[in-house]
C-alpha cells in the first residue's frame, strides 16, 4: 500500500532526473574513415569525454568511398545526421562554396590558428576563412632501400630526377628474387593512380585544363609523362601493377619487394615501424622526383574535420574538432601511442617538438614537402583550377576516375598510350561541355 | 516370348545400369564442383580472418599459423552485439510485415483473379528492375521530413517494400498449387474468408510460407545499399559494421574478413538449419 502510494512520486522524480541528465548530455555523431590515425582518435574518446563531461561521442566509421557518398547525400539534402564529418582537401572548398559547411571563425585563442601550416590552412579555407580543421596532412615523397643502393654503389641525389630513377630501377630490378625496381600506383581512381599521375604530368610541364577550361589530356606533356609511367612500370614494376593502390604497394615495400616507391608521406611512419615493416632499418627517404619543373611534383592532401551547416549541435561539434586538431591532442597521442603515431603535417609546433623529430627522422622531408606545395600554382603554365593532384571542381571525381581507367588500360597493354589519352580527352571534353565550362 | 525378351533385356539393363551409374557420378562431380566454386570465397574469407594482416595480403597460401588477433581487434573496436541486434530486428521485422501484406494479396490473386491479375503481378516485379540509387534522394528526403532516418522502423519499411514483389510472387505460386476444392469445402461449412485463410490456407501452405519468409530474411540481412545510406549509428546493421573495417590507408583484409565472418555466421547457420525448407520452397513450382 505504501509502495503503491509512493510509486508515482518516485517514478516522477526518476523521470525528471533522467531527462535533466539527457539535457545536460549532448551526443555528437562523428563520421570518419578507418585510417590508423582515426582509429587512434576513436580510442581516445574517453580522454575527450572526461575533459568535456557534457558531450558524448558517437562514431560512424565507413569505407572512404561509401562515406563520401553517404556524407554527400546527407549534406546535400540537409539531413543533419552528422555533426562532424571527415573530409579532404578536395571537398572542403566545393562544399564550403555551396554553404554546406559552417565557417570556423573566431577560434579560441589557445587553439593557436597561426600554428597551422600555411599550405594546409589555405587548402581548407574559402575566402580566407577556415571551413574545416586539419586532422592530418600528407604530401608525396620517395622511399628507397638504402641497403640495395649501397650494394649497387648508387648514390641518392638531393633532388632525384625521373630519368635517374629509371636508370636506378633498371639496375636494381631483379637483383634479388622478387625485387621490383620501382613500385607505383596503378589501381584506377581519382584518388588512386590519378593522384600520382597528375603529379607526374605536372612535373613534365602538363596541366589538366588550359585557362579556358579546355582539357589538354592528349598534349605532348601528358603523352610523355604517361608513356614514361607505362614503360617504367612495365619494365621495372612488380607483376600486376595495374591493381596496386596505396595499400598494396605499402605491403610490397614493407615486405622488401620494391627498391623504390613514390607515394604518400603518411606511409613513412608505417614503414619505419619494425612491427609493420621488414625494411624499417634499411629505409631511405628522398623528395618526389622531378622532370621538367619542380612545380606540382608532389601532392597535398589533408584529412580534415568539418561541421555541416545542417548539424543542430554546432557548439559541441566545435568543441570536439578544436580538441582533435589541437596541439594538446597531438601531445596526447605522442605520450600514449608513441611519437611516430602522431597525426603529421598540420602544425609547426609538431616539427619543433624534439621528441617527435627524434622519433621520426623523416619529419623534415614531410614538412618541406608540404610547405613546398601550392594548390593555387601547381603547373608550369597557368591553369584556372585549385589543386595539385586534383582539380577542385565537382566534376573531377568522375573525370579523374574515367581517365584513370583509360590509363590503367594502357598500362595493361589493352590500348596504346596515345589511344588511351585520345579517349580520355574526348570523354573529358564531353563532361566539361555538359557541365557548361566550355561550349559545345 | 517372355524368355527371349528377358534374355535380350538383361544385357541392356546392365549397360543401362552402368550408364545410369556414370551419369550419377558425373552429376555428383558437377554438383560438387559448382558447390566448391560457390563456397570458395566464403571459405577463403573465413581462412583470412585467422591470418595476420601481413599474411592476409601475401601470396595466397593454405599453410599459415592461425591467430585470433583480428577477432580480438575487431571485438575491441566496436560493439558487434549492437549491430547484430539491429540486423535481427530489421530482417525479421521486415519479413513479418511483408508476409502480413503479401498473404492477403497473394490470396486474392490466386483464388479471385481478375483479368488484370497477371499484369499486376508483372508490374510488381518490374519495380525490382529500377536501380535503388535512382530513388535514393527522394526516399532520403521523405525520411528526413518524417524523422525516419537512422531508425529501425525506417529500414523495416524500406526492406518490406524491397522484398514485397518477390514475397507476393512466391506465395502466389504456392497458393495456386493448392486445390481450390478444400477452400470451397470450408466455405460450404460456413467459414468466413478470414477463417478460410487462417485455418485452411495457412496450415496447408506453411512450408511454402516458411521458405518465402526465410528468403526474405536472408535478402534483408544481406542488403547493403539502403542500410548504409539510411542509417548512421542507432539503426546500423551488420553491413555497416563490415564497411567500417575497410581502409584506404593501412592493411585491413584480415580484420575485414574476421568482421565479415562474424556478420554472416548467424544467417549461414540459419540457412544450414533450414536447408530442406529452402530447397523445397525454391523448387516448389518448378517440378510440377
Image: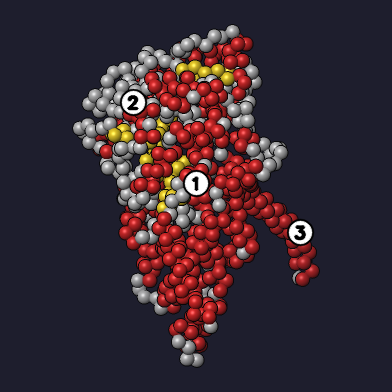
Report if the CB atoms under discs 2 and 3 are less than 8 Å apart.
Answer: no
Q: Quadrant of residue A72?
A: top left
Between residue B192 and residue A86, name the one nearer to us. A86
Front position among marks 1 and 3: 1
Question: Mark 2 = which residue?
Answer: A375
Circle 3 SS class: helix
For mark 1, name the chain: A
Counting from the top left corner in percent of width and height, residue B104 is at 43, 75
Q: Quadrant of the C terminus of chain B?
A: bottom right
Q: How much space separates mark 2 and mark 3, taking CA atoms? A: 83 Å
Vertical placement of residue B84 versus A194, above or below: below
Question: Mark 1 = which residue?
Answer: A50
Circle 1 SS class: helix
Q: Quadrant of residue B6?
A: bottom right
Q: Is residue A63 in view? A: no
Do the residues indicated by labels 2 and 3 lie within the same chain of the protein? no
Do the residues indicated by labels 1 and 2 lie within the same chain of the protein? yes
Would you call the spot at circle 2 few (<14 residues within 10 Å), some (14-19), or many (20 or more)? Answer: many
Q: Is residue B152 in view? A: yes
Counting from the top left corner in percent of width and height, residue B201 is at 51, 79
Between residue B221 and residue A275, name the one nearer to us. A275
Q: How much space separates mark 1 and mark 2, taking CA atoms? A: 39 Å
Q: Quadrant of the N terminus of chain B?
A: bottom right
Residue at point 65% right, 20% down?
A: A177
Residue at point 31% right, 37% down?
A: A106
Amino acid at each position: 500500500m505504501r509502495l503503491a502510494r509512493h510509486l508515482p512520486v518516485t517514478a516522477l522524480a526518476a523521470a525528471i532526473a533522467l531527462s535533466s541528465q539527457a539535457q545536460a548530455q549532448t551526443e555528437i555523431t562523428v563520421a570518419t574513415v578507418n585510417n590508423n590515425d582515426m582509429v587512434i582518435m576513436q580510442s581516445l574518446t574517453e580522454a575527450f569525454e572526461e575533459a568535456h563531461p557534457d558531450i558524448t561521442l558517437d562514431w560512424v566509421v565507413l569505407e572512404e568511398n561509401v562515406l563520401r557518398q553517404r556524407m554527400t547525400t546527407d549534406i546535400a539534402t540537409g539531413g543533419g545526421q552528422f555533426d562532424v564529418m571527415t573530409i579532404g582537401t578536395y571537398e572542403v572548398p566545393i562544399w564550403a562554396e555551396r554553404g554546406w559547411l559552417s565557417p570556423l571563425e573566431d577560434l579560441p585563442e589557445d587553439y593557436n590558428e597561426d600554428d597551422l601550416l600555411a599550405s594546409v590552412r589555405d587548402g581548407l579555407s574559402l575566402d580566407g576563412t577556415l571551413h574545416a580543421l586539419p586532422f592530418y596532412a600528407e604530401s608525396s615523397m620517395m622511399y628507397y632501400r638504402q641497403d640495395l643502393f649501397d650494394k649497387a654503389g648508387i648514390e641518392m641525389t638531393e633532388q632525384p630526377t625521373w630519368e635517374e630513377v629509371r636508370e636506378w630501377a633498371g639496375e636494381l630490378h631483379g637483383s634479388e628474387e622478387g625485387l621490383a625496381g620501382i613500385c607505383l600506383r596503378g589501381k584506377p581512381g581519382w584518388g588512386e593512380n590519378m593522384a600520382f599521375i597528375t603529379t607526374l604530368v605536372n612535373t613534365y610541364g602538363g596541366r589538366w585544363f588550359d585557362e579556358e577550361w579546355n582539357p589538354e589530356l592528349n598534349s605532348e606533356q601528358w603523352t610523355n609523362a604517361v608513356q614514361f609511367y607505362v614503360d617504367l612500370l612495365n619494365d621495372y614494376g612488380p607483376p600486376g601493377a595495374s591493381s596496386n593502390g596505396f595499400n598494396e604497394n605499402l605491403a610490397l615495400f614493407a615486405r622488401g619487394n620494391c627498391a623504390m616507391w613514390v607515394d604518400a608521406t603518411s606511409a613513412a611512419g608505417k614503414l619505419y615501424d619494425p612491427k609493420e615493416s621488414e625494411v624499417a632499418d634499411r629505409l631511405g627517404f628522398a623528395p618526389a622526383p622531378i622532370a621538367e619543373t619542380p612545380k606540382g611534383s608532389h601532392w597535398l592532401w589533408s584529412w580534415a574535420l568539418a561541421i555541416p551547416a545542417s548539424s543542430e549541435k554546432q557548439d559541441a561539434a566545435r568543441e570536439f574538432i578544436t580538441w582533435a586538431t589541437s596541439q594538446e591532442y597531438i601531445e596526447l597521442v605522442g605520450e600514449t601511442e608513441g611519437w611516430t603515431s602522431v597525426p603529421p603535417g598540420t602544425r609547426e609546433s609538431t616539427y619543433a617538438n624534439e621528441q617527435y623529430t627524434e622519433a621520426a627522422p623523416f619529419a623534415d622531408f614531410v614538412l618541406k614537402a608540404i610547405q613546398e606545395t601550392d594548390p593555387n600554382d601547381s603547373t608550369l603554365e597557368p591553369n584556372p583550377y585549385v589543386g595539385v593532384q586534383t582539380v577542385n571542381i565537382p566534376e573531377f571525381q568522375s573525370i579523374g576516375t574515367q581517365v584513370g581507367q583509360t590509363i590503367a588500360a594502357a598500362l595493361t597493354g589493352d590500348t596504346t598510350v596515345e589511344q588511351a589519352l585520345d579517349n580520355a580527352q574526348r570523354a573529358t571534353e564531353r563532361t566539361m561541355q555538359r557541365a557548361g565550362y566550355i561550349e559545345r | 516370348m517372355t524368355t527371349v525378351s528377358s534374355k535380350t533385356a538383361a544385357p541392356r539393363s546392365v549397360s543401362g545400369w552402368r550408364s545410369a551409374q556414370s551419369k550419377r557420378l558425373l552429376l555428383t562431380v558437377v554438383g560438387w564442383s559448382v558447390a566448391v566454386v560457390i563456397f570458395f570465397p566464403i571459405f577463403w574469407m573465413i581462412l583470412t580472418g585467422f591470418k595476420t594482416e601481413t599474411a592476409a595480403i601475401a601470396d595466397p597460401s593454405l599453410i599459415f599459423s592461425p591467430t585470433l588477433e583480428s577477432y580480438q581487434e575487431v571485438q575491441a573496436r566496436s560493439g558487434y552485439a549492437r549491430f547484430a541486434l539491429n540486423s535481427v530486428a530489421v530482417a525479421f521485422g521486415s519479413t513479418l510485415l511483408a508476409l502480413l501484406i503479401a498473404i492477403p494479396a497473394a490470396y486474392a490473386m490466386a483464388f479471385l483473379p481478375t483479368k488484370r491479375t497477371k499484369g499486376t503481378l508483372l508490374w510488381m516485379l518490374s519495380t525490382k528492375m529500377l536501380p535503388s540509387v535512382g530513388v535514393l534522394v527522394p526516399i532520403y528526403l521523405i525520411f528526413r521530413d518524417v524523422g525516419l532516418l537512422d531508425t529501425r522502423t525506417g529500414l523495416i519499411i524500406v526492406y518490406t517494400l524491397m522484398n514485397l514483389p518477390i514475397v507476393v510472387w512466391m506465395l502466389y505460386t504456392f497458393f495456386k498449387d493448392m486445390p481450390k476444392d478444400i477452400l470451397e469445402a470450408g466455405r460450404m461449412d460456413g467459414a468466413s474468408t478470414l477463417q478460410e485463410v487462417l485455418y485452411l490456407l495457412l496450415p496447408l501452405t506453411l512450408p511454402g510460407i516458411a521458405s518465402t519468409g526465410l528468403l526474405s530474411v536472408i535478402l534483408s540481412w544481406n542488403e547493403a545499399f539502403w542500410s548504409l545510406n539510411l542509417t548512421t549509428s542507432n539503426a546500423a546493421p551488420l553491413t555497416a559494421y563490415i564497411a567500417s573495417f575497410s581502409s584506404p590507408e593501412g592493411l585491413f583484409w584480415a580484420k575485414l574478413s574476421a568482421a565479415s565472418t562474424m556478420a554472416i555466421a548467424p544467417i549461414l547457420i540459419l540457412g544450414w538449419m533450414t536447408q530442406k525448407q529452402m530447397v523445397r520452397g525454391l523448387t516448389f513450382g518448378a517440378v510440377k
